[in-house]
Amino acid sequence: MPDLLQLTHIRKTFPGVIALDDVSFSIRAGEIHTLLGENGAGKSTLMNVLTGFYAPDSGGLQLDGQPVRFASPRDSLALGIGMVHQHFMLVPAHSVLENIMIALQGVPLLFSRRQQRARIEQTIEEFGLDLDLNAPVWKLSIGAQQWIELIKLLLRDCRLLILDEPTAVLTPQEAAKLFQVLLRLKQQGKCIIFISHKMREVMEISDRVTILKKGRSVTTLEKGEFDQKKLAGLMIGGDRIPEWQKSLPFSEEIVLEIENLSVRNDRGLADLDNFSLRLQKGEILGIAGNGQKALAEALTGLTRVESGRVLAAGEDITRSCARSSYIAGIAHIPEDRKAIGIVPDLSLDENLILKNFRAKCFRNGVFQSRSAIRDNAEEKIGQFAIKAGPPGSPVRLLSGGNIQKVIIARELSEQPAVLVALYPTRGLDIGSAEYVHKVIADGASNGMSTILISEDLDELYKICDRIAVIFRGRLIGYADPTSSSRAEIGLMMSGEVSA
Amino acid sequence: MSLAFRVEKRDQGSALFRSLTIIASVLVALFVAGFLLLAAGVNPAAAYLEILREALGSTYGISETLVKATPLIITGLAVSVAFRMQIWNIGAEGQIYMGACGATGVALFSGLEAPLMLPAMFAAAFLAGGLWASVAGLLRARWQVNEVIVTLLMNYIAILLADYLIYGPWKNPDGYNFPLTAQFVDAARLSEYFNTRLHSGFFLALFCALAVYLLMERTIWGYQIKAIGSNPAAARYAGMKTGLAIFLVLALSGAIAGIAGFSEVAGLQHRLQHGLSPGYGYTAIIIAWLARRSALGVIIVSLLMGVLLVGGDSLQLSWQLPVAFAYAFQGLILFFLLAGDFFINFRLRRVKEDADA
């Protein structure tokens, strides 16, 4: 029996860029096949070729041994290839049911809502998912939104499911649940292409792993042939990884103090409830558990605080807007880079001064000083190893990792006393992620305190001095990564134990 | 062998390529319009020569073209300032009228003398246009009321308000009951040149273009306008006050459009009359759109429109072509310019049947 899908010598170029050079691999029925590669290795382009968004310049696809060409995403979907994108394709204002119905095929013009509903509910039940069909999508958690995308594909009888970094946005519990469903699908004979940067997941779930590097498929390894070290080695190849060391013990001086902070979300529920926290100078404090995001937003002035106080170096900054928080010394690496981190149509130079464009050194009166702005950009490009395009080109053309570097360069340029970083390495490859860790660690040794919010426990363990665990909006306690085990923190996150 | 094509995104084209595309678009539009002329029994080549001769072939023609381009440049700039922030000011037409009313009020009733009169009229027009637009700005910034609807509807109010003044309180008592205000005194008129209708309003328009260029490209205000236009969330997060910026930009846009009203009454018509603007405010939207980002672009597109307006008039006289032809002609040029835009951003590529090639 031929493999379900075979790719031979796929090549795809864009003006000025070779996105895919030579990619060949095959996918068997009933396997979970992981694609591993750094940012810019060509994973996204490859997926767009598989789903019919792009036609390859050369090379071919064979489905069940037959050559196929996809002129549009509709063609590939019709042949049973479906994808859960990193950015979901949902209508936020519509209900779950309506969002799923959009994707259904063969629904008559005048349809029985009840019949369709029953069909959808059956699938939801089959996989033991927890989903309210009547809820509007915008109210759902990211994890639940992902279930919708998955159900859409299952209802269309897709044979090959592509998941692009599905766990990047999930909590550990949600991710575990997802893996159960994926294993179930595998037993039913479906194939899954899984893309992830998290090595542990890759080890846990993959039957085979194909490694992409610079637009080429390096090799495909069977289960048992690979371990974390080997995969990382293949993925990085000869690339240099920045080296860094954890800083010396931090001082006792308290730079940021949160007292009895409460924050309510859109639904009126408490995201933070009487939450208190102390951050010491030069410390990297990890935050684990629900309510992380509300904390970051409250700290950076993006969310209204219900009650409580935030003190920076003894000064009350609770009710200031983002700008005055910044002046008070809090820098912020936001969760959603493209949505609030950058101004996509402005150039790299202009994005680097977004927060301090009013600074005296960047202007003469009301006129901007172009040479100063350019000099600043050149300095940052060198200092943070940003791969910049031609001067003046819009920053949206940069890769995700480079955009993250632009944001970090900008936020750290004022030597902030406190950095609040949300998921700073999400979606970044090993090299870029290490770079971010190095910057944070270097900052710490210069006296900068960091609040690191991450759902990746490995990341927290690796870099943090202490880990504060939140449960139901309250601080459960601090864990010491050198002495607490993952299981202990896991228990704290579920509110079982207080350390 | 089949002829299948695929659309691909293109790199940012060079400035030369962009200019060539615009020229090519105009030529294609001329070619297609030629068939319309043939159908009307007119030799296209002769007609085009006529347009060029009329609009550019004499001192008088050139002066008329510049006269027509003047309000278009100013309002085009007004609209484009707001466009840069993704604010759609559809109300330039009404703002012209309000500016004209403001200037006229000062001219007729202030009794000021020569050196002060024109600056006072200018200031009144600037304020009237700005205040008029700031209503939409306030509604948008404070209560998220769509500025397209508000600015558009306020056009009708402004035009009717001007009519009320002309037919009512401001009507010239010695005007045999014609719906016109009294003529302005000399102190309230812009100087004219070369014994034509060309007036200093044209130079005022060029000055406005320079000012808008400096504002948008060189100042921290322009920087904020562009940042908010491209990503309001990021701008807010960086500490910019987006609500205030929306209010101020709409007010500024209206104020610039008000200058066009000043230039028309003080430079050309020397009184307030019905039909002051034959839709300059609407044409300005198209001009701002075609010129995209640059103040220089607004000048060039406005001059092109001026040629068409002046040349189109002459076609009516020489060949008794209906006035609709001039509009059809304008429409075709716009159509092909927009199509040309597509080729600036995308390229067509032949799809090869042979997958291994």
Image (tube, coloured by chain):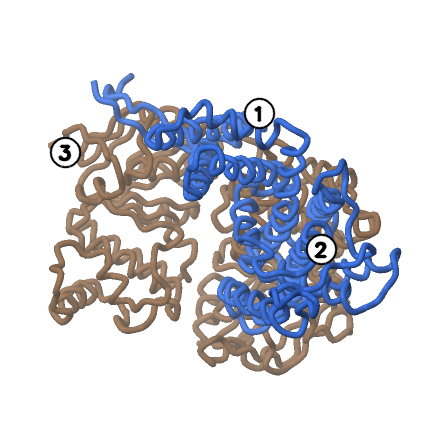
Q: Are marks 3 and 1 on the same chain?
A: no
**Pointer 1 chain:** B
Instruction: List x then y, in percent, for residue A209.
Output: 33, 37
Residue type pointed to by label 3: Asp
Residue A64's disc number = 3
Residue to which mark 2 is pinned:
B270
**Pointer 3 chain:** A
Instruction: List x then y, in percent, for residue B315.
Output: 48, 35
Callouts 2 and 1 close, C-beta under 8 Å: no
Residue A230's disc number = none
Residue to which mark 1 is pinned:
B16
Picture layout, residue A242 above or below residue B168: above
Q: Sort mark 2 into few (<14), some (14-19) or many (20+) by Cα contacts within 10 Å.
A: many
The color chain A is rendered in: brown
Closest to the observer, A298 or B47: B47
Query: Which quadrant of the view contains residue A99?
Result: bottom left
Mark nearer the viewer, 3 or 1: 1
**Pointer 2 chain:** B
Residue type pointed to by label 2: His
Please state if B275 lies on the left or on the right of A142 as rendered: right
Instruction: List x then y, in percent, for residue A266.
Output: 47, 75
Please state if B37 lies on the left or on the right of A483 as rendered: left
Q: Is residue A27 at all visible to an observer of this figure? A: yes
Residue type pointed to by label 1: Leu
The color chain B is rendered in: blue
Q: Are marks 2 and 1 on the same chain?
A: yes
In terms of secondary structure, where does tag 1 sit? helix
- Image quarter where the N terminus of chain B lies is top left
Which residue is at 51% across, 30% downward? Answer: B22
